Each structure stands twice: as C-alpha cells, then as structure tokens.
Image (cartoon, rainbow, N blue to C red):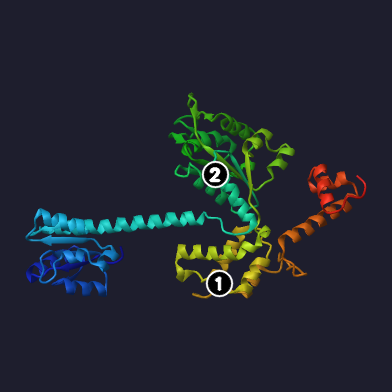
Amino acid sequence: MKGQPRVLLVEDEEFVRESMIAILAEEGFEVRPAPDVPAAREAFAREPVDVVLTDLRLPGADGMELVSDPAIAASAAPVIVITGHGTVDDAVQAMRAGAFDFLQKPVAPEQLVLAVRRALEHGRLRDEVDRLRSAARRGRDERALVGDSAAMAEVRRHIERVAATDATVLVSGESGTGKELVAAEVHRLSARGDGPLVLVNCAAVPPSLFESEFFGHRRGAFSGAYADRTGRFAEAAGGTLVLDEVHTLPGEVQAKLLRVLETGEYQMVGESRTRVVDVRIVAVTNADLAGLVEKGEFRSDLFFRLDVFPIQVPSLREHPEDIPAIARELFARARARVGSAGVPEGVADDEALGVLSAYDWPGNVRELRNVLERASILAAPGGRVDADMLRGLLGPGRRREPAPDGDFDLRRKLERAERRFLEDALEAAGGSKKEAARLLGVDPKNLSYYLRKHGLTDGPR
C-alpha cells in the first residue's frame, strides 16, 4: 500500500471524532473526517480511501447505508461499524450487509487501532489474491497457441486428441516454435491438468547427477548429499513430466530413463526400496530423433517408447499467414505485463505487417518476439512500430519474395514446390529413382507415388 493508509471517519459527535482522529493519526493513518453520510459520500467521491470507519447512529441516514453504498462497495474498502447502542442484531445486520467488523462504544484506543490494521491487512490480502488470480489467467492465456492457419489447426487437433489419453507424446520442431507451449497445453487439457507440470532441461543435467535429479536421493547417499532430495518423477506424480531437449541425453542415461518409462518403477539414490510413480511423459526436441537413431546416437527402444504420439510444431515460415495475429498477441501480452505506458500500441499498418510476413524467421516465434521487443523500445512512447523501423531491424538477409505471379493459393504453391523438388532430385541422381529417393529421404515406393502424381513416371529406375 503506497503512502499513509487513508481512513474515512464518519462520526457526528465532535469530541469523539477528534479523539479518534488523534488516536489514528498518532499511529500513522491519514484521517478524512465527516459528520454524516452525505459528507462522507462527498469526501469519498473526491478521493477513495482504504478503510471506512463509521458510527451506526448518525443524523439523517445511518451508517448502515455506507456499508451498502455502491461506490464504496465497488472500491472494496472494508467498512468498520461503531455504535454506542449496539445489539447482537445490529452486529448481525451490519456483517450481513458487508461490514468487515463491528465495534461498540466506548472503544479502547488499542481496539480501534487493531480493528483498522486488520481491515487494512484484509484489503491487502484481497488485492494480492486478485493479482495472483489475474496472473494465473494471464499465464493460461500465454500458453494459448495463436494462429488460424491450417498448420496450427492441425496442431490443436492433435493436442485435443492426445490430451484425452495418457499416451506419451513426442513434440518436435525447430527452436523457437513454441514446443513447450504445446507440451503445456497437452497437460492443461488432460485429466491431469490439476496436477503438477514439471519441466526438466535434459541438456542441463550432468550424467553423474541424472539419478539424483530424476529419482531423488537420501541424505548421505553420496558426497555433497546433505539433505534428502525429491526427484523430478516424484515431483510430477499425478501430473506431467516434460523432458525438454531429450535428444541430449547420453547413452547410459537413456538406458536408465527407458527402464523407468517401461516399468514405472525407480529407486532413490541411497534407498533400497522400489518406488512406483504415475506420471505422463511429454518429450520435447528440436532434433531429428529418427535420424539420430539411424546414426546410432539415440536408442531405438527409447525412441519408440517416446514416439507414441508425435506432434510436429510447424516453423513460422510454414504458416506466415499467422504472423500478423501472433505479432498483435505478443504486443498485447507485453502491455499486460509492463503496462500500456511502456509498450507501443502495436504494429502500425498493413505495410509493417507485410514486412514481418515477408521475413523468413529462422528463429521462429522467439525471434519475432525479440524483434518486436527491440522495436517497442525504439518506438516513441504511445507510438506504433512502423515498416521502416522493422526493415532496419530485420535487414535484407532473409526476406521472402512475394509470389511473382500473384498466386497465393497454398495448395497450388506446395504442389509446384513438390514437383520442383522431385525434378531437382531426379536430375541430381542422374535419373536414378533409387538414388533420388535416397536424396529426398523417402521410401522408393513412396517416390513412385509422387512421380505418378506429378506425371514424372518415365525414365530409368
């Protein structure tokens, strides 16, 4: 609470009013006195207060009207009612009407001060709860996936389908595409949504500490184990454990992880008994795990255990039509975090949005967010981010040229690109379909399908 706590004191007896002012002022409260309800309403309209302290019996309207006054109720300022004619019925009526506390005259100074302090603390806790609820809502909103493209719609469909199950999920995609958001959405929409969501960065766990990090340890189990530690599996019990950068796990660690995934059983370091854990696994990677398996750099049995339900998150250049919506959303979130005074209103116009949409975004949404953050710092307070500023920040390096024929139909563009890839692969392979299939990374039988599809069936095999 900023500055001195403000108390609106409504008391018609001048001697009592002055005495209370003196008591409260000595305790550091700023007191706004009023002799009756109309004067109290006028004072409150000029500047709201933190606590209302009112006599019940006042000339004209009584203090009960302040308890239910719309302006005071809207401000959520706690109301303390004081009366020299108090009865149990008065107290019950005041509390039912919304009064925070009820005091009887004569009120001892320490009792008066204590009641006001309790009311202030109540207001502070209420504001904190509101802040936390608002932050929680923003947190849920910030997990939302933005974009109405076919690519993002497909990701959402996959999330909704697998969330209804307990299947292990493998989320793949380039860095900065929002894979962690997908993992969080799988958890939130599942029956485990009220349980813990635990994320561990596998790249940050040394092999020597893997068992301690994931399974926990007992005090004294090894040098430096000064206290018991709960492992990540136990922390995620009943919820979801997200294994970020799972491709970085060394071979010996992969074997240990595989065992617990297959059996649901593990042992804490320094403990002989076997524990059983109920955890859903979501693995996240920006690597080609299947390719790593072929190279012998990732265990095939662990890959198949993780790859029960794969979700591929598209790169930003695969759904550029979502860039304007994502840019607007990033600005909205920034304004919610730091306040509207510190962030421009958004991107100026269609030209500026076009600059964003024409860029290749090798760093995906993360790079887009960083560029917009830099632009918002450079923009004038209250201004907007314009096209010239964005061109200067992005530079000429990775801009996509617009369709030269004016044809933006996604299906036709993809089919033309697919045919071009096939033709280029056949040319590079000297007409050998087997070699072309290898270059394209597809099975020769699948290549035959694509060749027939595009009328490229002639030529050697």
Query: Which quadrant would the C terminus be assigned to in this image?
Result: top right
Q: Which residue is mark 2?
A: 163
Q: Percent x, y for residue 251? A: 65, 35
Q: Amino acid at mark 1?
A: Leu
- In the rendered image, is residue 176 in sight? no
Quadrant housing residue 291: top right
Q: Residue furthest right?
A: 460
Q: Is residue 76 left or right of residue 232?
A: left
- Which is more toward the observer, 159 or 286? 159
Q: Secondary structure at mark 2?
A: helix
Looking at marks 1 and 2 on the same chain, the residue that comes earlier in the sequence is marked by: 2
Q: Which residue is mark 1?
A: 378
**Residues packed near mark 1 inside 10 Å, few (<14), some (14 to 19) or many (20 plus):** some
- Which is more toward the observer, 62 or 411? 411
Q: Name the residue at 12% across, 64% down.
A: 56
Query: Which quadrant would the N terminus be assigned to in this image?
Result: bottom left
Q: Percent x, y for residue 423? A: 85, 55
Task: Say above or below: 118 vs 438.
Answer: below
